[in-house]
Image (cartoon, coloured by chain):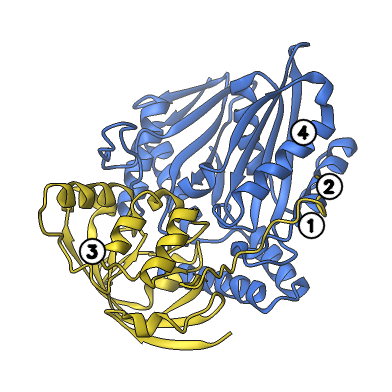
């Protein structure tokens, strides 16, 4: 288990050494997008239009933050469950997205896309939204404002604590459930 | 007949929404601390440490524990001798949700199921009413996040499958859910009634304290057996492996049709955000 400090945008050289279980402190800009925002990103791609942010080297954070109280850049901001974005992730990785941040399992297509495009899937601690918001210095809605919590935000993060769940070599951190020990 | 003002219901509901989302229940905190002491794996310990730090920070800053402040679910016991004045109870609860989710800077997650358009104020709340004897009004609130709720299931077993069938289904469900619902989870199990009723009692069971024991010793033993089996899955905090896959199992059992064995598994995330008030 190694620890890395990385800055966005991410490159192949940044990601190649990462192995499942490594800790990464991420600094720079990351973009929030979840279910409805991903659907709209795909609509834009299908229409041949530009996306609201540069996909090359990007990190997409699957999060729908709670509203920012006065004096804070953002409310609580922990990861949402990632599998709902599995249908979208492979195409976005092919177009240059380098990492996603969420919680929970990814399907085989996403894992293959990570290998094919030298990308990684990071986990952040689910339900630790107040704690994670401490690492977010700025938040600005850059697209789909009408989606409210699901709008795309550009976040400025400093030392955002991440764990490599799926690396670009086929490694995965999640424990396999021991069905036999449980009596199945 | 006792009169309760709708305004008092609105205020009580708003306060519950804010408190439940920002203050980790003491029974959950105690379980986190116990689990942290028992875990061997550094990553399991670290997740639990982060969750405790998160709870301290939420308490201090009034930020929600989790950004998913859930759909607002209520279990209401209304006494037969209670009259609500100045509005009706359902509207008062919804108004309390609007107020609490607005003033507490909680995320509004209610949307149209197909257009996905957000209703903007986290209403309508999901409200289960029970009419009971007496002149009290008891309102229990639960913030039900989507990640854990999506891992829940209802099934209709054959009566012959019995307890063994129930155990298999629940273990397989928790195994399959893996890291998705923010383990260590709390598992509400509803057995009996009808298709819909099993789901309802599985959710209501989640209102119980983690440190309680079911009054029926047989059901208490089933809860213990299920909890031990689920913890042997080794999924661990956030799916990173470890001894703590669930913080507790709560079973509700009720009579059902002689042809049926309805079973519902309601998965709840580790924060178990809920509050109760009696007016």
Chain letter for blue, please: B
Question: Quick check: A148 left or right of A158?
Answer: left
- Quick check: marks 4 and 2 in contact, CB under 8 Å? no
Circle 2/circle 3 CB separation < 8 Å: no
Residue carrying label 3: A153
Are discs 1 and 4 both within one chain?
yes
Disc 1 versus disc 3: nearer the observer: 1
Residue highlighted by disc 4: B166
Is B219 placed left or right of A152 in the picture? right
Number of residues whose C-alpha sits closer than 10 Å to that of mark 4, classed few (under 14), some (14–19) or many (20 or more): many
Task: State the residue at coordinates (35%, 40%).
Answer: B110
Q: Secondary structure at mark 3?
A: strand
- Which mark is nearer the camera, 4 or 2? 2
Give the residue at mark 2: A183
Residue corresponding to mark 1: B232
Decide which of B253, B156 is in the foreground and name it: B156
Callout 1 touching callout 3 (CB < 8 Å): no
Write down the colour of chain A: yellow
Are the two marked residues, 1 and 2, in contact with CB atoms closer than 8 angstroms?
yes
How many numbered circles are shown? Answer: 4
Q: Quadrant of residue B51?
A: bottom right
Q: Disc 4, disc 3: CB below 8 Å? A: no
| Quadrant of residue B252 within the rendered picture | top right
Can residue B27 be seen here? The reply is yes
C-alpha gap between disc 4 and disc 2: 12 Å
């Amino acid at each position: 288990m190694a620890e890395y400090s990385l800055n966005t945008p991410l490159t192949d050289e940044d990601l190649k050494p990462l192995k499942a279980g490594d800790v990464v402190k991420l600094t720079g800009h990351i973009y929030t997008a979840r279910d409805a925002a991903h659907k709209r990103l795909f609509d834009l791609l299908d229409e041949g239009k530009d996306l609201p942010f540069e996909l090359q080297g990007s990190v997409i954070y699957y999060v729908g933050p709670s509203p920012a109280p006065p004096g804070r850049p953002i409310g609580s901001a922990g990861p949402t469950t990632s599998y709902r974005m599995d249908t979208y992730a492979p195409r976005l990785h092919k177009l240059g997205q380098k990492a996603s941040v969420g919680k929970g399992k990814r399907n085989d297509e996403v894992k293959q896309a990570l290998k094919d495009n030298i990308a990684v899937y990071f986990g952040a601690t689910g339900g630790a939204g107040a704690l994670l918001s401490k690492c977010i210095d700025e938040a600005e809605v850059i697209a789909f404002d009408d989606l409210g919590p699901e709008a795309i935000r550009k976040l400025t993060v400093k030392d955002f604590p991440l764990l490599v769940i799926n690396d670009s070599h086929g490694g995965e951190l999640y424990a396999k459930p021991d069905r036999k020990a449980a009596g199945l | 007949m006792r009169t309760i003002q709708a305004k008092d219901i609105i205020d009580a509901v708003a306060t519950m929404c804010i408190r439940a989302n920002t203050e980790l229940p003491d029974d959950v905190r105690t379980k986190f601390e116990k689990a942290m002491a028992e875990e061997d794996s550094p990553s399991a310990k670290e997740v639990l440490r982060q969750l405790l730090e998160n709870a301290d920070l939420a308490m201090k800053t009034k930020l929600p524990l989790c950004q998913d402040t859930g759909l607002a679910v209520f279990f209401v016991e209304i006494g037969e001798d209670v009259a609500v004045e100045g509005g009706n109870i359902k509207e008062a609860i919804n108004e309390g949700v609007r107020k609490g989710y607005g003033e507490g800077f909680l995320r509004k997650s209610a949307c149209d199921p197909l257009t996905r358009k957000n209703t903007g104020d986290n209403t309508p709340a999901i409200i289960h009413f029970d009419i009971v004897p007496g002149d009290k009004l008891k309102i229990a609130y639960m913030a039900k996040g989507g990640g854990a709720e999506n891992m829940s299931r209802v099934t209709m077993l054959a009566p012959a499958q019995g307890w063994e069938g129930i155990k298999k289904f629940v273990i397989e469900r928790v195994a399959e859910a893996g890291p998705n619902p923010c383990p260590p989870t709390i598992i509400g199990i509803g057995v009996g009634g009808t298709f819909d009723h099993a789901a309802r009692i599985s959710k209501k069971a989640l209102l119980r304290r983690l440190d309680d024991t079911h009054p029926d010793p047989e059901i208490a033993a089933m809860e213990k057996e299920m909890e031990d089996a689920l913890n042997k899955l080794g999924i661990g905090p956030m799916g990173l492996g470890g001894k703590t896959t669930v913080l507790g199992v709560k079973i509700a059992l009720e009579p059902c049709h002689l042809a049926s064995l309805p079973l519902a598994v309601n998965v709840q995330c580790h924060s178990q955000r809920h509050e109760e008030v009696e007016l």
